[in-house]
Amino acid sequence: MESEFWFDSWEQGGTKTSFHLRDVHEHARMLDRLGLVAGARVLVPLCGKTTDLRFFAETAAEVVGVELVPRAVAEFFAENGLDPVEEEPDVFRCGNLVIRRQDIFRLGPDEIGPVDLVYDRASLIAFPDDMRQRYAETITRLVRPGTRYFINTLEYAPRLPSPPFSVGPAEVVERFGHAFDVEHLAAEPRPDHRMVEKFGLASLVEHGFLLRAR
Ligand SMILES: C[S@@+](CC[C@H](N)C(=O)[O-])C[C@H]1O[C@@H](n2cnc3c(N)ncnc32)[C@H](O)[C@@H]1O
């Protein structure tokens, strides 16, 4: 979606930001159990104000979130009782946790530096088809051989014209298979997901993919 959509969503809050979870996501915990977080430099694109940032920061060497909307960044620090230092314009640091207030499409590999793990929850699926391709190209430019890239998606039917968009295994392989080895780690049916009743969906599956950059 274009920037305006996200600025409006954060302005309105409530159901418009219902992607925000109160608790750490189970997939973030799974990556920790797999030993991919401790000592790693973790990039969290489109981080919103997710509590996963703090969870990773407990053991990671450094966690770098990237978020477009200033309100989301401000809410993250305020709700977590943190007082960050703005070490460069729009780059906020609190210990080993950094949030860059910036458009992911303008982020280059030199700015971000070496990344061990990219954690993508509800980020690829935040964009419509044409933007997903640009997003895939952007993330592919930010990694180096060996970087692990975790992608969480929702796949559901019938498809909806607004985020979260439905993305399944075939699309992940199609968009990333040329540059990454793709492992499909999780496919969890979620009949109780809030979207099922709200949109009358016939099915909804939450996926987890673990990629390795070649
Ligand atoms: C669906 S939310 C996911 C948030 C977070 N990953 C989570 O798990 O709660 C998508 C987030 O991406 C942000 N966003 C949208 N477009 C962006 C862009 N081009 N660059 C950086 N952030 C963006 C939105 O403001 C929003 O907070």
Image (tube, rainbow, N blue to C red):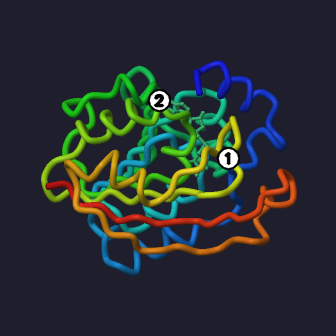
Which residue is identified by label 1?
Answer: 159
Q: Position of residue 181 (x, y in %)?
A: 23, 61
The residue furthest bottom is 33
* Amino acid bearing label 2: Met
> Residue at 71% of width from left, 65% of height from top?
203
In front: 44, or 157?
Answer: 157
Q: Tell me the quarter of the picture where residue 94 sits.
A: top left
CB of residue at label 1: within 8 Å of ligand 1? Answer: no
* View quadrant of ligand 1: top right
- Going by the numbered disc 1, the residue's amino acid type is Arg
Q: Which mark is residue 131?
A: 2
Q: Secondary structure at mark 2?
A: helix
Q: Residue 41: horizontal and vertical position, in percent?
A: 28, 55
Residue 42 located left or right of residue 196? left
Q: Residue at x 74, y 24 (%)?
A: 8
Q: Position of residue 86 (x, y in %)?
A: 44, 29
Task: Between residue 74 and residue 10, name the one nearer to us.
Answer: 10
Q: Earlier in the sequence, mark 1 or mark 2?
A: 2
Seen at 83% across and 43% down, the residue is 15
